[in-house]
Amino acid sequence: MGVKVNRCAVHTLQTVNCQLSITMPITIADFEYIRKLVYDRTGVFLSEDKMYLVESRLGMVAKAAGSNSVSGLVAELKQIKQQRFSPLYESTVEAMMTNETFFFRDVNPFEMLKKSVLPELLKQRQGCTLNIWCAACSSGQEPYSIAMLLREYFPQLARNQVQILGSDISTAMLKRANSGCYAQHEVVRGLPTALLHKYFHDCGKEWQIKEEIRSAIEFRQINLTEPFGSIPQMDIIFLRNVLIYFDVQTKQSILARVRRVLRPDGYLFLGGGKTTVNLDSSFKPVQLEKGVCYRLI
Ligand SMILES: C[S@@+](CC[C@H](N)C(=O)[O-])C[C@H]1O[C@@H](n2cnc3c(N)ncnc32)[C@H](O)[C@@H]1O
């Protein structure tokens, strides 16, 4: 007998967790320990002025671990031999990630896709599969926005003609992305009402994306600071609002690997105001519609 998973229930629990926060003061030594732990695992660099963030985000993790201080949490973490496989280590790292995202974020990249990039690539590829990668996609609104855009404006495309990969380092975010469930406050951010009613089921407290859109995306855990594993050559890469968290050296090594998986005539999208200039000279900015994306020289 098959097991029916309530995809939305996973999300509800996590939303509750995110909403609770307990600030616990932290010592410089503990801050340094957490800072190194997060950097080693994710490449995310926490500058000194982010001490408040550690205090406010690790309070809940400490409490859940039965400790009433971040120092207690740090002491626990230090005792773990194989940290990489420990749930406490993972929840500590995940608590320090910024997962802000929303549907059709910044509008312009989606207009560029719709009006310039996709029409051109589809003409060139002549029926071959197009590969699109949303790297660091958080809870999935970005790849779902692309999947809806494809369904709306390129309905003639066969299902197997476009493959969308959504990835993130966070297990919790990938679980949410896979569930395709969003709270009311999330579906009112960026998502036109017509698309909400067309592509989501109303599940009472939440909205769940329809299977026809969900199944268009494969979600996978990829740490951008490590080898990407086996992924196809990409026609379009969204790498938005994540480079900002890395130091220059990490940004450069990520861009160098991104460059290798981007097709020679592919397109790279970065977050608003971000640029490859001074980081990687093999990309050139290209103005399309009202925005800028990057192509290989
Ligand atoms: C602010 S969100 C950006 C979401 C989406 N791209 C957007 O622009 O709306 C940043 C995401 O980067 C992820 N992240 C941070 N470090 C990462 C790493 N080393 N590898 C992969 N993802 C990472 C976080 O988990 C988080 O979900």
Image (tube, rainbow, N blue to C red):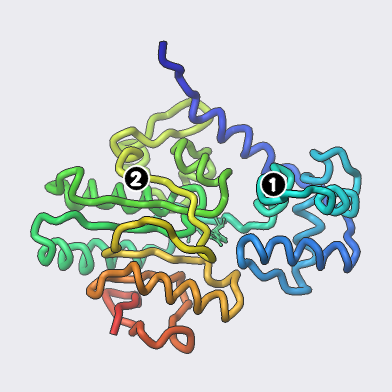
Residue type at the position of mark 2:
Ile
Q: CA distance from mark 2 to mark 1?
A: 25 Å
Instruction: Tell me what residue is drawn at x 73 percent, y 73 percent.
Output: 47
In the figure, residue 16 lies in which quadrant? Answer: top right
**Above or below, 5 relative to 234:** above
Instruction: Tell me what residue is drawn at x 67 percent, y 66 percent.
Output: 39
| Outermost residue, front side | 81
How many other residues sit within 10 Å of disc 1, few (<14), some (14-19) or many (≥20)?
Answer: some
| Outermost residue, top side | 1
Q: Which residue is mark 1?
A: 91
Q: Which residue is mark 2?
A: 217
Q: Nearer the viewer, residue 8 or 87?
A: 87
Query: Residue 109: horizontal and vertical position, in percent?
Result: 35, 66
Query: Residue 138: horizontal and vertical position, in percent?
Result: 51, 52
**Above or below, 200 relative to 90:** above
Instruction: Tell me what residue is drawn at x 57 percent, y 80 percent.
Output: 249
Query: Residue 213: horizontal and vertical position, in percent?
Result: 31, 40
Instruction: Tell me what residue is drawn at x 52 percent, y 40 percent.
Output: 175
